Image (tube, rainbow, N blue to C red):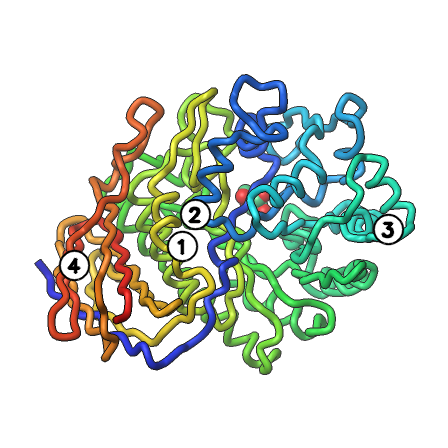
């Protein structure tokens, strides 16, 4: 048993935690959209406008704040006009990035924007800079947001939507250093400025434009981009960084059957997010000293080998307690850097990579990662307060991650213990915060434990005891656990 102290200073508010840090990502990839979120209106699975009701309910529960779509790599080959109008006449295309399957475009702009309205979340649309034209991108914005008389607004009305939707977040290209066109940052930033120039603010909306930022620790891309692209051109730059369990893209390792050694390697890999964010923030602080451009981590999560017998292009993987620890570590990191990190989107929401939801026919399960989003949701739109936590190292990786925030007179502390064999007795020094009561929730289990369609609640949160004594709280974190404690003020 290790004794660890978390010291909180609730009087020091460090930064605002945008609720968008708890965002999600859905791509036309494998069974994320089709046979995942979207089953079609004629499906026997209960649905609203073709979207599964059980998924809608689950996402509302975790208060999904923002949803990114339609990709990913798919975004730079997506032509939005193929996905509007009567479904039977929508163009069929090949999804070249993901399995070469037929994309029938039955889920398009209307279906996505209506889904976001239903969920009460912000849509985050990724435009096609890689293979689309400026006119096409500009018209898409007009179609979605213009309330007056114009060709695109008329077309939208003909397709059944009188009023424009509310659209704030708009990405201009995706991974343009890779699948989005293999560009150099010099070339991309020139193109970015040109494309963004024709994406107008219509009818009172104000676009929050996001430029394609770096992959992992590529600070050269960040530097060149920010030397060319200024706050008048963009509100954010993206960052993509995945956790590869073995650290080897050619043999990433199974999502459920991994050795302890690979587990600790996964923790080391995921902790690199901290240094990566810090390195980009250093460049941003230098080139954008007024902090006018945000870092948007719009793809993150574990990327393991696909489940045996599934299409390699569909990126379907299971989700264990290891994923829960990884989610907690990353969300705590994003909270800690929330002065620059304004949004993060886990890849991906349903049936792809580190999914929060898995489906099979009529069945749906919530993964351990889902439960972490639920336990952390009170951080949304809270103020990060100063806190320092003791830690220990195993197999070269730090075992404890934490963050503490303040909202509506309450404090929320979220802490994870990644160790596989060390239990922790956590003492939280509340720094003068007078707690009337404390509610603890714990997610724990064997590191390979996961929910299946036959046993859907093998891993689920439970209440945990929190003892309040002399301005301190005491809570146990068993090996491989995530704990959240909400303190209500007197
Ligand atoms: O999330 C899967 C893929 O990973 C996305 O399409 C792409 O942007 C990234 O390389």
Give x and y (percent) for residue 69: 62, 44
Task: Point out which mark residue 139 bears.
Answer: none
3 and 1 marks in contact (CB < 8 Å): no
Residue 422 image-quadrant placement: bottom left
Q: Secondary structure at mark 3?
A: helix
Task: Point out which mark residue 62 bears.
Answer: 2
Dot 1: within a 10 Å radius of its alpha carbon, few (fewer than 14), some, or many (20 or more) residues?
A: some
Q: Nearer the viewer, residue 304 or 162?
A: 162
Q: Is residue 419 toward the left or the right of residue 126 in the image? A: left
Residue at image location 21% in from the left, 63% down from the top: 437
Image quarter of the C terminus: bottom left
Task: Point out which mark residue 377 bears.
Answer: 1
Give x and y (percent) for residue 192: 74, 61
C-alpha gap between disc 3 and disc 4: 58 Å
Residue at image location 32% in from the left, 29% down from the top: 456
Q: Is residue 13 toward the left or the right of residue 279 in the image? A: left
Which of marks 1 and 3 precedes in the sequence?
Answer: 3
Say how many tags the image has: 4
C-alpha gap between disc 1 and disc 2: 6 Å
C-alpha gap between disc 3 and disc 1: 39 Å
Q: Is residue 372 visible?
A: yes
Q: Nearer the viewer, residue 487 or 455?
A: 487
Task: Point out which mark residue 135 bears.
Answer: 3
């Amino acid at each position: 048993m290790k004794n660890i102290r978390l010291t909180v200073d609730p009087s020091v508010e460090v930064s605002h935690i945008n609720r968008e840090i708890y965002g999600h990502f859905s791509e036309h990839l494998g069974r994320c959209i089709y046979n995942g979120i979207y089953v079609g209106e004629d499906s026997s699975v209960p649905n609203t406008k073709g979207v599964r009701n059980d998924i809608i309910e689950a996402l509302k529960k975790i208060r999904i704040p923002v949803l990114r779509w339609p990709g990913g790599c798919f975004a730079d080959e997506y032509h939005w006009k193929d996905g509007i109008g009567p479904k039977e006449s929508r163009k069929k295309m090949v999804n070249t990035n993901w399995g070469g399957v037929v994309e029938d475009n039955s889920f398009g702009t209307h279906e996505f924007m209506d889904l976001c309205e239903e969920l009460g979340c912000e849509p985050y649309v990724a435009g096609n800079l890689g293979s689309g034209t400026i006119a096409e991108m500009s018209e898409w914005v007009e179609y979605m947001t213009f309330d007056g008389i114009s060709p695109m607004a008329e077309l939208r009305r003909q397709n059944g939507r009188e009023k424009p939707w509310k659209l704030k977040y708009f990405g201009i290209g995706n991974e343009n250093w890779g699948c989005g066109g293999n560009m150099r940052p010099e070339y991309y930033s020139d193109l970015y400025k040109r494309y963004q120039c024709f994406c107008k603010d219509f009818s009172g909306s104000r676009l929050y434009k996001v430029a394609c930022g770096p992959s992992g620790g590529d600070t050269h891309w960040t530097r060149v981009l920010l030397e060319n692209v200024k706050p008048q051109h963009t509100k954010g730059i993206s960052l993509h960084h995945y956790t590869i369990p073995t650290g080897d893209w050619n043999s990433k390792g199974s999502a459920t059957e991994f050795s302890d050694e690979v587990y600790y390697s996964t923790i080391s890999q995921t902790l690199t997010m901290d240094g990566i964010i810090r390195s980009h923030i250093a460049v941003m602080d230098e080139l954008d000293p007024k902090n006018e451009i945000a870092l948007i981590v719009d793809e993150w999560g574990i990327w393991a080998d696909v489940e045996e017998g599934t299409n390699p292009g569909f990126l379907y993987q299971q989700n264990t307690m290891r994923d829960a620890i990884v989610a907690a570590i990353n969300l705590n990191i994003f909270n800690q850097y929330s002065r620059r990190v304004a949004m993060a989107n886990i890849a991906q929401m349903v049936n792809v990579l580190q999914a929060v939801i898995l489906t099979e026919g009529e069945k749906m399960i919530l993964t351990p990662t889902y439960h972490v989003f639920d336990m952390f949701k009170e951080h949304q739109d809270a103020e990060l307060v100063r806190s320092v936590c003791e830690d220990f190292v195993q197999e070269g990786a730090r075992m404890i991650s934490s963050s503490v925030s303040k909202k509506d007179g309450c404090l929320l502390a979220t802490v994870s213990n990644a160790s596989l064999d060390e239990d922790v007795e956590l003492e939280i020094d509340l720094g003068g915060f007078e707690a009337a009561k404390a509610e603890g929730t714990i997610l724990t289990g064997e590191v390979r434990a996961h929910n299946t369609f036959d046993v859907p609640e093998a891993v689920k949160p439970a209440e945990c005891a929190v003892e309040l004594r002399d301005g301190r709280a005491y809570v146990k974190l068993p090996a491989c656990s995530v704990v959240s404690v909400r303190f209500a003020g007197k």
